[in-house]
Image (spheres, rainbow, N blue to C red):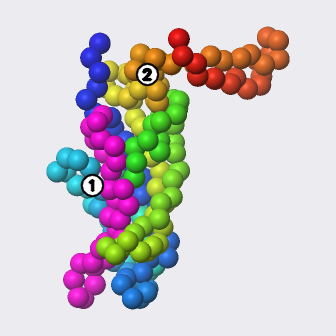
Amino acid sequence: MTKPRSRILELTIISGESLTLTGNRRIKKNTYVIIKTESTNNQISNMDTENGPYPIWGQKFNVNMPMHATFFTLEVRCKNSYGDHVVGSVKVPVSDFTRWYFPVDYLHFLSYRLRDRYGERNGIINLSVKVKSSDEGVGAGGGGSMGCSSAATGWKYGGGRMGQGVAQGVVVGVPYRY
């Protein structure tokens, strides 16, 4: 079985908080988000024209991410009578939603601090990410799951059973070298 060369992310840009332009001027309207990956195919959200510094987009995207990609970039922009301005951007590490063992289609809700072109704090962006299963039915981590696989890292995941045969409780996985 060949390893997939990319993974599909279902990315939902939910909202923004406390967005300002240079000089702490509040944004009045016309904000949107650009999703940038390593490929040249950038995706652009709809423009929020009503909520000012607290925009609500609630828009879903299917983003094709190469397996070797370590981050994707979200850039919040504002269009006004003086032109198109970058409000802030953030590089979202892929490891934030793939580094632990998560099942395929696990939904992550994330919030990131935006930085303007000078590196100053400039609001927050809220999003959700779900790593979709590939066409072959195998997740990005292999075997239908996300995160580290034993074949790739040399680790096994041992678990314990709670409650002497009772079907309720918590199963704890502890990594160990084999």
**Furthest residue to the left?**
40
Q: Is residue 39 visible to us here? A: yes
* Rendered position, 50 above or below 46: below
Please tell me whether mark 2 sits on a helix, a strand or a loop. helix
Q: Are marks 2 and 1 in contact (CB under 8 Å)?
A: no
Pick whichever of labels 2 and 1 is earlier in the sequence.
1
Local crowd at mark 2 within 10 Å, few (<14), some, or many (≥20)?
few
- 151 sits to left or right of 171: left
Q: What type is the residue that disc 1 sits on? A: Lys
Q: Position of residue 101 (x, y in %)?
A: 53, 30
Q: Residue at label 2? A: 153
Local crowd at mark 1 within 10 Å, few (<14), some, or many (≥20)?
some
Foreground pick, 149 / 105? 149
Q: Residue at label 1? A: 36
Foreground pick, 116 / 103? 116
Q: What type is the residue that disc 2 sits on? A: Thr
* Rendered position, 84 above or below 111: below
Quadrant location of the N terminus in the rendered image: top left
Please tell me whether mark 1 sits on a helix, a strand or a loop. strand
Magenta range is 62-91
Label 2 and label 1: CA atoms lie apart by 29 Å
* Rendered position, 138 above or below 7: above
Q: Position of residue 5 (x, y in %)?
A: 25, 29
Magenta stretch contains residue 66:
yes
Q: Look at 51% across and 53% down and name the residue there.
A: 110
Magenta stretch contains residue 49:
no
Q: Look at 78% across and 19% down and name the residue there.
A: 162
Q: Position of residue 85 (x, y in %)?
A: 27, 78
Q: Position of residue 146 (x, y in %)?
A: 46, 29
- 58 sits to left or right of 66: right
Q: Nearer the viewer, mark 2 or mark 1?
A: 2
Q: Quadrant of residue 159?
A: top right
